[in-house]
Amino acid sequence: MSSTSDLEQLAEIELEKEEEEEEEEEEDQTCVTDAPSVPLSSTLGPDSSHPYYDVARHGIIQVSGDDRYGRKLIIFSSCCLPPSHQLNHRRLLEYLKFTLDQYVEMDYILVYFHYGLRSSNKPSLKWLREAYSEFDRKYKKNLKTLFVVHPTNFIRIVWNIFKPLISHKFGKKLTYVNYLSELGEHLNYEQLIIPPDVLRHDEKLRAAQKGEPPPSVKTPPARPPLPTQQFGVSLQYIREKNREVMIPPVIAQTVTYLKEKGLMTEGIFRRSARVQLIKDVQKLYNLGKPVNFEEFGDVHIPAVILKTFLRELPEPLLTFRVYNQVQDFLNVESSLRITRCKQVVESLPEHNFIVAKYLLSFLHMVSQQSIVNKMSASNLACVFGVNLVWPRHGSISLSALTPINIFTDILIEHFHTVFGSRCPPAQVTP
């Protein structure tokens, strides 16, 4: 059996060999690591007041909201790592923990884009050992899957080095993904923040595979929705197909069940559920068949279904138009933020306002039991913010989450003030 030092040397050799092969294939290829690192785009860069601005400005770590099953998506992009002499890797580890600390109490997924790791920018194996040892049970418990995208022999050798340190349970969470199209089978591809270098590399890999389909990860055009469709269709469509009922059945039924069974459940909305069960429930709803949550015996299933319904709306519940107003929220004085929230909410179309009021009334009710369920308004805002508002194009960046969460926190905490004056039909209150 090879010693650890032998494996480390082999890993270094393999990484150098991979670099040489890439240089031969594309001599003029530019990578973030060959020049001073820049954010993926000007909209993704953090504010200079960020406590880890020196690291965050590179765009190495991004949070992409929730996946379709209510799990937070956190992305690590190797191609955004600057040369090692330009980055304090200890600070990188602290920033990674700082980011994870905001989400590890709920289920989350890590996506690691390996392409772009070079001898010049890679953290040392000592750093990797230190990082793994510092990621105690708090970080590992709710990690559902670690996707390693575009793995190479270097990754597999490093895995063998760390195998003695890694528990069998954690090892089962690792999933290798060779192409972005495969990643799209597991996650909402449109929601991911993928560096341009990774996109180009994926296209090159796909083109090299004879007989493979064109390098596209777009899903085929969707079939026309069923008359009974509930997920992935607009609020207006649901209303028209459900005899002008204002509150979509999925929201009404999940809220009703959770009011009765979930208010005292610790961590409600922070846990995921078995993916196949969520798909089964979605299918029942889309076919117009009755759903009895009692049969599943798991209060987290209706909780995930509620978040999934909101996330799959073609336009967010609070509308695309609200996104820029929310992003400007940090520029509003603290004493004026409740009033500003009220103005934003009252500008919503009537149907959106009614549904939002119904939902936020329930979330306010959940927050009132936070001593038991541990879900304060701010905790609920971290879960629901990204499911209520998102941009028309692109994904939600890490820096964009703060104003979204603050805005949602106020909607929940000050529900009666924010939704108090506009008077839609009486059926609004859940």
Image (tube, grey):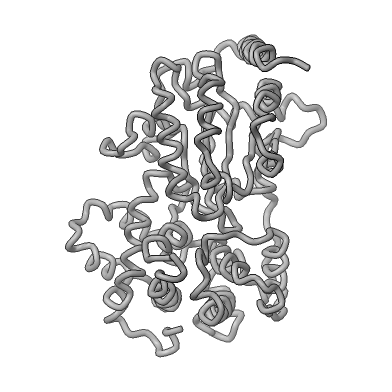
* Residue 262 picture quarter: bottom right
Residue at the spot x=55%, y=33% of the render? 132
- The image position of residue 126, as x and y in percent, is 53, 21
Q: From the viewer's perspective, is 427 left or right of 141?
A: left
- Is any atom of residue 21 visible in this view? no
Depth check: give the residue in front, 138 or 309: 138
- Is any atom of residue 42 visible in this view? yes
Relative to 309, is 65 above or below? above
Residue at the spot x=66%, y=77% of the render? 293
Q: From the viewer's perspective, is 384 left or right of 313?
A: left
Relative to 62, is 366 above or below? below
- The image position of residue 167, as x and y in percent, is 67, 39
* Residue 283 picture quarter: bottom right
- The number of callouts visible is 0
Residue reaching furthest to the right:
211
- The image position of residue 424, as x and y in percent, is 37, 84
Relative to 205, is 101 above or below? below
Residue at the spot x=44%, y=55% of the render? 390
Depth check: give the residue in front, 140 or 223: 140
Residue reaching furthest to the bottom:
426
Depth check: give the residue in front, 430 or 129: 129
Q: From the viewer's perspective, is 253 left or right of 394?
A: right
* Residue 260 picture quarter: bottom right
- The image position of residue 261, as x and y in percent, is 56, 78
Quarter of the image with the N terminus in it = top right
